Image (cartoon, grey):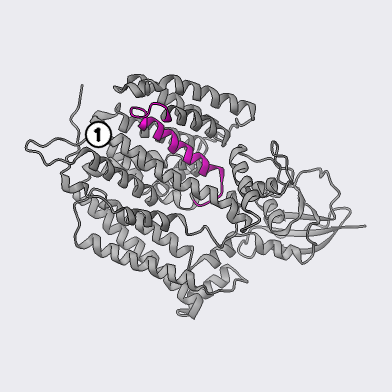
Amino acid sequence: MNHPTPAVVPQRAVERLPRLALLLFCAAYLLPGLFGRDPWRNADLTAYGYMWGLARGRMDWWAPALGGLPPETALLPHWLGAWSVQWLGGWIDPALAARLPFIALLAITLALIWYATYHLARTDAAQPVPFAFGGEAAPVAYARTLADGALLATIATLGLLQLGHETTPELMQLSLVALFIWALAAAPTSRWRAPLAVLLALPALALSGAPSMAVAHGVIAWLISPRSRYAGMRRMAPWLAGGIATAALLATWTHAWHWRVDLPGLPASTAGFLRLLLWFTWPVLPMAVWTVWRWRGHWTERHIAIPLGTVLVSLLSAAAMGGSDRALLLGVPGLAILAAFALPTLKRRASAAIDWFSVFFFSLTALAVWVIYSSMQLNLPPKPLQHLQRLAPGFEPSFSAPSLAFALAGTAAWIWLVRWRTSRHRHPLWKSLVLPASGVALIWLLTMTLLLPVVNYARSTRPLVQQIAQWVPADDCIQAPGLSPTHVAGLEVFGGYAVEATEPSPRRCGHLLVMTRMPNLAPAPAGWEEVTRMRRPVDAHEYFTLYRRVR
């Protein structure tokens, strides 16, 4: 039974978003944070540590180990970063060299989401209701408008902001999920590119550390494809089966299968996951839920079933992994596409609420950033700087004219957009996502320009390594049993040390570094003498004791 489409869209509502404006949106989102910063602690620094070690020849390419610790994810993303460091590390900062292919993957993800939405919106079931006397939106213009909306929805997603700018395997996984969605969306009109994309996306996703999700995505699409009204989609079934089999075989061959299920057993854990889900997916999840409801008679149609299937896999994986934000990240492409299909059915009151929330929230946040910056540079007002100096002892503010110029330009563009949105131009479908997307881009731009020095000081392990360098010569060996991969990566990358984090250590190192969660009051281990005690300036919960081997 064919249900009537809920989209009622006149031609004036599919006014084209200027391409230059769209490109500027993407540039303001992609480029800040690319330059002038260290790899940040935890996943960003850990992944870069493996890439840096591979590029320097300090690790086996098939069995990399950071201080003797193997990576938790598969090899392909680390190889990509290492190749970039090898090719470009002699010309530019190695951290920037490793970051470039991953920011390119984020740009590719945005493009794939745009084209996937465009193809899905061109299907008959997704088209708006034809008017009795004409005047409904033209199919191409309608599809292009929804694609613009999906791209803006992706940029507006809060959870993508930091994770999308890290040098981590999850960013490669995200781009491969977007490629897989594009392949299914383009299947009716692409005879060879779509099947080849499936054969690339699923095995590469398995080699990037997500074999279970690769198989799950493939199985859901394999179940959907035979029921499609499009011959091109039905022809995808054997290709999907081949992609699933190849992904499973490659994951087995490379030992990429890992048991990561950690079901939250307490109400507090469940509530924490729900809070994560709410802020991480804002504003696309509420819009996606609205799409599923308003298009409830079309759940089996491609424009709903394909993105919804990928979202369900991501949500179930994140819940099974105890609330993993990185598993949730892989649902962003599907959520953004579903959010785009909410635009033709969104009530005017809901659109106005999104606009005014965006205006107040992002304007106040931008004002707070400027107040903090003024305090750092002019000591006006003095309290924010005093607070920063308490939280980050040893931090010294610095001035950058280019950073200030970019921040001023971004703020001026935001003011112009707010005036544009609140005064007129109320017809285009994508209008409801302009302010959320530009607000996220603005805050990221201001943070990565005006506040970058203090954020980099707080998120980098370089200050700790600089303290250690006062006592341990460069290129020396440090024994550090039980030290986290993040700290091992910091010691090797910023200090050039050879670190042994396994126990027993295979090498006889001249120094021992021990981390505790409280000040270490225990006597020195046998054969060692205490040299100094220290902690990372902005971390009050990690204490380090450095020992020297007794000769």
Tell me if 107 is positioned left or right of 343 in this view.
Answer: right
Q: Which quadrant of the rendered structure holds the C terminus?
A: bottom right
Q: Nearer the viewer, residue 30 or 310?
A: 30
Q: Nearer the viewer, residue 222 or 360?
A: 222
* Chief SS of the magenta region: helix
Question: Is 527 part of what is drawn in magenta?
Answer: no
Percent of width and height locating residue 129: 16, 35
Q: Residue furthest left?
A: 133
Q: Nearer the viewer, residue 57 or 396?
A: 57
Q: Which quadrant holds the N terminus?
A: top left
- The residue at the far right in this view is 551
Residue 398 visible at all: yes
Location of residue 424 (image quadrant): bottom left
Reading the image, the residue beneath label 1 is 126
Question: Badge 1: how crowded within 10 Å, few (<14), some, or many (20+)?
Answer: many
Which residue does the image show at 41% across and 26% down from the upper left? 221
Q: Percent position (x, y) of residue 506?
A: 83, 43
Residue 72 position, x and y percent, is: 63, 39
Residue 178 horizontal side relative to residue 34, left or right? left
Q: Which residues are magenta?
A: 165-193
Count of numbered circles on the image: 1
- Evaluate whether residue 40 shows in this view: no
- Residue 192 in the magenta stretch? The answer is yes
Q: In the structure shown, which secondary structural element does the residue marked by tag 1 occupy?
A: helix
Residue 63 image-quadrant placement: top right
Image x and y of residue 252, in percent? 62, 26
At label 1, the amino acid type is Ala
What residue is at 66 percent from the left and 57 percent from the top? 542
Q: Is residue 24 above or below residue 2?
A: below
Viewer-proximal residue among 319 and 311: 311
Residue 185 lies left or right of residue 250; in this view the side is: left
Res 368 quadrant in image: bottom left
